[in-house]
Amino acid sequence: MSTNPIPTKLLKWYSSHKRSIPWRETQNPYFIWLSEVIMQQTRVEQGTPYYLRYIEKYPTLLELANAPDDEMMKLWQGLGYYSRARNMLAAARQIRDEFGGVFPMEYKHIRALKGVGEYTAAAIASIAFNQNYAAIDGNVLRVLSRFYGEFSPIDSSIGKKRYAQLADELLNKEFPGEFNQAMMELGATVCKPRQPLCNACPISAECVALSKNLQAQLPIKAGKTKVTKRLFHYLVLSSQGKTLLKKRSSGDIWQGLYEFPLIEGDLNEMQVMEQAALWCKEPFVLKTISNEIKHLLSHRELRAKFYSIETDELIPQTEFTLVNWSDFENYPVSRLIERWRGSSG
Ligand code: SF4
C-alpha cells in the first residue's frame, strides 16, 4: 500500500467538502457517463438541469439508444458542442447492439465507444467499476502542475506523458473513483484557474507552486489555437405561416441541427437578396435585417445577420423542409439561432 499521505488527505477533504451533485449519488455507469459528457462543456450549475432532463426522459441506456435523433438533440440544445450529443447517441446504440444494452466494464471497451476519450473512460472505469485508472481533465492537470511545480506544457505530448505518470503515482488504489473525484473537485473549487484558494487547500503544506509563489504561472500551455472567422447570412423566410429549414450535414459545425437557408461569405445586402430568389418567388419583401450577432465557438468566430423576408410563395428544394412557424420550437437549432430568436422577440 502507498505510503504517500497526499491521497489520504485528499480523500478526507473530499468526503467532508464535496458539493452535493445528483450523479455523485450513483454508481450507475450510464448516469456517470452521461454526467461526464455533459460536464465536459459546462459548469455544474448549468449542466445539472440537462443531466436531470436526460435521465428523466431516458432513465435507461436502452431508452436513450432507442430515442429519435431529433428528440435527443433537442434536449441538448443550448449546451453547444453538438458532436458530443451525436456521439453519445451513437455510443448508446453501440452498447445496445454490441453489448446487449449492458454498459461494458472493461476500460478498452469503454474507451472504444464513440466519443469516449481517455479521460471519460478512466472516469467511468474508476467511479462505476472501482478500477485503477487516473482520470485527467483540465482541473486535474492544473492541480498536478501546481502541486508538483511541473512546467511541462499540459497540451504537449511530453507534458501529457508526464502528467499521466504523476497522476498514476498519486492515484489511491483502494478508492480510485473517489480519489479521481477528489482531484477534480479540488481543481474546480479550490485550485481554481485564477486566484486559487490555497488557504483552504488540504495539500498546501506540500505544494511546490505555493512555496515558490508560482500559482499564477502554472500550468503552462504550449500552443494557442488559430481562430477562423466566418460570415453567415441567414434568410428567415415567411410565407403563409411557414418557413424553410435545412438539417446541417456532416463535415462542419452543428451537424444534425436545423437552420434557415444560409449564404456564407463577405457579401453586401444586395448580393444576399439576389440569392434569396433561389428560395422564394419574386416579388418578396425584405422586412428587417438583424444587427450583426457575434458568436464564438472553440476556434471559430462567427458573425451572423438574419434577413427576415416575406413572400407569397416559397420554393422548396431538396434538403429543405417546409416548416410551420408554430412547429419551429420542435426543431433542434444552434445556440446562435436561439440567440437571434431571443433578441427578435
Ligand atoms: S496550495 Fe494552492 S496552488 Fe497548491 S494545489 Fe493547493 S490550491 Fe493549488
Image (cartoon, rainbow, N blue to C red):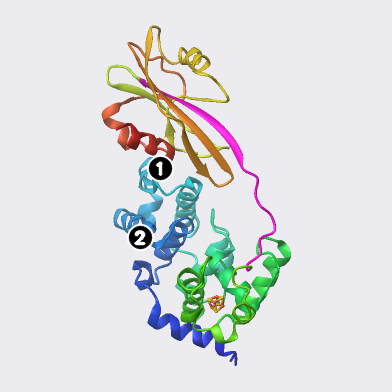
Of the image marks 1 and 2, the number of the one nearer the N terminus: 2
Identify the residue at horizontal 55%, vertical 47% (top origin): 298
**What residue type is disc 2 on?**
Thr
- Depth order, front residue of 267/114: 267
**What residue type is disc 1 on?**
Asp
> Residue 301 sits in which quadrant?
top right
The x, y position of residue 334, in whole percent, is 43, 39
In magenta stretch: residue 234: yes
**Label 2: element kind:** helix
Residue extending farthest right:
158
Residue 332 appears in the picture as rendered:
no
Quadrant for the C terminus in the image = top left
Q: Please, is residue 287 above or below residue 144 in the view?
A: above
Q: How many residues crowd mark 2 within 10 Å: few (<14), some (14–19), many (20+)? A: some
Q: Which mark is residue 69?
A: 1
In magenta stretch: residue 105: no
Q: Is residue 312 left or right of residue 106?
A: left
Ligand 1, by image quadrant, is bottom right
Q: Which residue is mark 2?
A: 48
Task: Report the span colored magenta.
Answer: 218-237
Q: How many residues crowd mark 1 within 10 Å: few (<14), some (14–19), many (20+)? A: some
Identify the residue at horizontal 33%, vertical 37% (top origin): 342
Q: Please, is residue 259 above or below residue 235 in the view?
A: below
Q: Please, is residue 91 above or below residue 332 in the view?
A: below
Q: Is residue 222 left or right of residue 297?
A: right
Residue extending farthest top:
283
Identify the residue at horizontal 37%, vertical 38% (top origin): 338
The x, y position of residue 254, in whole percent, is 49, 39
| Tag 1 and tag 2, C-beta contact below 8 Å | no
